[in-house]
């Protein structure tokens, strides 16, 4: 990370809680991503070494049992899936390291602004930083979708009917917590709370 990236403050300002609210967003640095990156990396490495061991005719790693595997077609398939697992693992580790999607939402009554800050992938647009006027905020909206893939999201609705999601992507936040956050934010901003 360069010096500009290290200067961003993710802490909540406790001295000005009545004027400034800052809500951190976790992004890709979550336990589930770390778990899957490790599982894919270990599994991919084992599959690749098993496929290569069947090609060379000796174990490249102690404990690799390749004797019953014929290189064509099983060994090639194991090499393919092993390489795929390693690439997916590398991708996940890089998003975790770069903290893609992490950042904060800040509501500042002193400046009269609402700021959305997120880290993106490295490059010219790594810092995603948008500011809006607090006076443009029309309502706070909660979206609740139950079922196989539950979704619980808080949105800020602006006057031009544009909606900005505030909550993290991934594991859904408990219902009580999301309702408390949304009502607290609506009271702070003095706008309507919409749960359609």
Image (cartoon, helix red, strand yellow):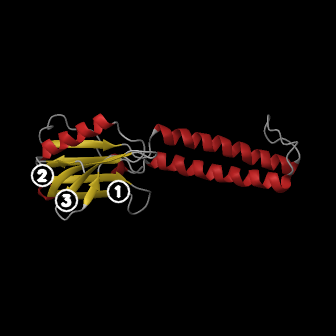
Instruction: Choose the circle earlier in sequence order: 3 or 2.
Output: 2
Residue at position x 75%, y 50% in the image:
78
- Marks 3/1: CA distance? 22 Å
Tell whether 33 sits left or right of 110: right
Q: Which residue is label 3 attached to? A: 158
Whole-percent x, y for residue 131 in the image: 22, 58
- Marks 1/2: CA distance? 21 Å
Q: Say which element carries label 2.
A: loop
**Quarter where residue 175 is shown:** top left
Q: Say which element carries label 1.
A: strand
Whole-percent x, y for residue 186 in the image: 16, 45
Whole-percent x, y for residue 128 in the image: 33, 57
Seen from the viewer's position, the closer of residues 157 and 14 is 157
Contact between labelled residues 2 and 3, with CB atoms less than 8 Å apart: no
Q: Which residue is label 2 attached to? A: 111
Q: Say which element carries label 3.
A: strand
Mark 3 or 1: the one toward you: 3
Above or below: residue 63 compared with residue 129: above
Residue at position x 56%, y 42% in the image:
36
Tell whether 4 sits left or right of 22: right
Q: Residues within 10 Å of mark 2 (few under 14, many from 20)?
A: few
Seen from the viewer's position, the closer of residues 16 and 74 is 74
Residue 37 numbered tag:
none
Instruction: Choose the circle earlier in sequence order: 3 or 1.
Output: 1
- Marks 3/2: CA distance? 18 Å
Instruction: Choose the circle earlier in sequence order: 1 or 2.
Output: 2
Q: Which residue is label 1 attached to? A: 127
Tell whether 98 sits left or right of 36: left
Tell whether 8 sits left or right of 171: left
């Amino acid at each position: 990370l360069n010096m500009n990236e290290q200067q961003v403050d993710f802490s909540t300002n406790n001295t000005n809680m009545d004027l400034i609210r800052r809500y951190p967003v976790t992004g890709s640095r979550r336990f589930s991503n770390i778990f899957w990156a490790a599982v894919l990396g270990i599994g991919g490495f084992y599959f690749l070494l098993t496929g290569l061991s069947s090609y060379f005719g000796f174990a490249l790693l102690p404990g690799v049992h390749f004797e019953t595997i014929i290189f064509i077609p099983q060994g090639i398939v194991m090499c393919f899936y092993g390489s795929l697992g390693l690439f997916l693992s590398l991708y996940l580790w890089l998003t975790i390291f770069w903290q893609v999607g992490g950042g904060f939402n800040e509501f500042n009554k002193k400046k009269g602004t609402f700021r959305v800050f997120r880290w993106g992938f490295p490059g010219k647009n790594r810092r995603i930083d948008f500011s809006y006027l607090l006076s443009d905020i029309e309502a706070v909206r909660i979206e609740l979708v139950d079922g196989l893939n539950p979704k619980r999201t808080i949105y800020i609705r602006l006057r031009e009917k544009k909606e900005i999601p505030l909550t993290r992507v991934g594991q859904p936040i408990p219902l009580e917590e999301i309702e408390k956050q949304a009502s607290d934010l609506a009271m702070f901003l003095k706008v309507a709370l919409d749960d359609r």
